[in-house]
Amino acid sequence: MSKLVGSFAAVASVLLLLVAAAAAEEGEMAKHDEMAAPAAASIKGEIVDLSCYLDHGAKGASHKKCATDCALKGLPVGLLAEDGKLYLLVEDHKMADAYKDAVKMVAEVVTVKGPVREAAGVRALSVQAVAK
């Protein structure tokens, strides 16, 4: 009888752990869903390659060739907004072509539309549309 009680206790412990793990995962998914719903923004500014801009302030038409080369190598790009704020541009996984279009417009003044997120001191704009 004591073996049966011990087995039951072991099975109950495993089930309790599984329920706790599922609840924790559901909580993380809910937190992710909350993060996934910021309001969309429409921000005008210059697309800059972040490597050169952050290192030595390079931007503008005179920097277009270098910025294009950096962006096409996969280096990160950002949007230097008219108000001076800098946004890391990130791909919206459901609209990947919009980000690719933005990368091609480096060193140009454009309007980028998409949700803005901020985490750990980094402000990011998820590119859903870009237009000159």
Image (tube, grey):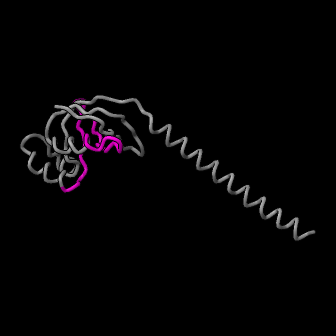
**Residue 17 coordinates in the image, percent (x, y):** 70, 57
Point out the residue furthest to the bottom here: 3
**Residue 22 coordinates in the image, percent (x, y):** 63, 51
Quadrant in the rendering for residue 36: top left
The quadrant of the picture occupied by the N terminus is bottom right
Answer with left or right where residue 127 lies relative to residue 14. left
Residue 19 on the magenta span = no
Answer with left or right where residue 33 lies relative to residue 40. right
Residue at 76% of width from left, 60% of height from top?
13
Residue at 23% of width from left, 48% of height from top?
50
Residue at 19% of width from left, 32% of height from top?
131
**Residue 51 coordinates in the image, percent (x, y):** 21, 52
**Residue 85 coordinates in the image, percent (x, y):** 28, 35
Point out the residue furthest to the right here: 1
How many numbered circles are shown? 0
Residue at 53% of width from left, 41% of height from top?
31
Say which of 18 and 66 sits in front.
18
Quadrant in the rendering for residue 100: top left
Residue 74 on the magenta span = yes
The quadrant of the picture occupied by the C terminus is top left
Quadrant in the rendering for residue 78: top left
First to last magenta residue range: 73-98
Answer with left or right where residue 63 lies relative to residue 35. left
